[in-house]
Image (tube, rainbow, N blue to C red):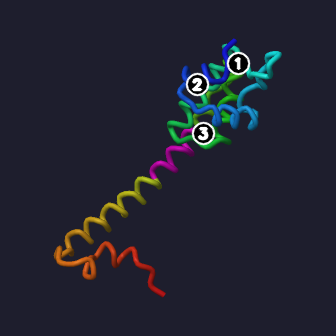
Amino acid sequence: MLKIGEVARLVGLKIETIRFYEAEGLIGRASRTAGNYRLYDDTQIERLSFVRRARDLGFTLEQVRELLALSGDPRGSCANVDAIATVHLREIDRKLIDLQALKNELLRRLDCCERTTVADCQIIEALTLHD
């Protein structure tokens, strides 16, 4: 059993994030010491590592919740896992398209820049709200 600070260092999460994941039900409730310190067991630490890695890969909290539930049945079909991953890949593809469009717009603005004054700056112009 480890205290929350030790778990945070071990799995690479902030203490507040661990508390949040606990409140969200992604890990079981921590047991408490007589001094009211949270204590986490190996299973909770493994789940926190799973959650951290899934979040690092961009899965939503709901997707992580579903993946955790599916991981609880090792003999189950991975078709549901594949479906979640496929939805996530589509979202990544959509974001990549948006990022490429953003890159192209910035490149276009930089190419038009005559590098004179801020008053004539294409990037500042693009960022200025026009009513």
- Label total for image: 3
Q: Mark 1 — residue?
A: 40
How crowded is the residue under tag 3: few (<14 C-alpha within 10 Å), some, or many (20+)? few
Gap in angstroms between the C-alphas marked 1 and 3 = 31 Å
The residue depicted at 53 percent of the width and 42 percent of the height is 58
Q: Position of residue 79 (x, y in %)?
A: 62, 32
Specify the amino acid type for callout 3: Ala
The alpha-carbon separation of the residues under discs 2 and 3 comes to 22 Å
Instruction: Tell me which residue sits at (80%, 19%) in the image.
Output: 35
Q: Please identify the quarter of the rendering in which residue 47 is found.
A: top right
Question: Which label's residue is closer to the chain start, 1 or 2?
Answer: 1
State the image coordinates of residue 84 (x, y, percent, origin top left).
60, 39
Residue carrying label 2: 49
Q: Are marks 1 and 2 in contact (CB under 8 Å)?
A: no
Q: Of tags 1 and 2, which is closer to the observer?
A: 1
Q: Main secondary structure of the magenta part?
A: helix
Q: Are marks 1 and 3 in contact (CB under 8 Å)?
A: no
Of the pair 114 and 117, the residue shown nearer to us: 117
Q: Which residue is mark 3?
A: 83
Is residue 95 among what the camera can see? yes
Element class at badge 2: helix
Q: Which residues are magenta?
A: 84-93
At label 2, the amino acid type is Ser
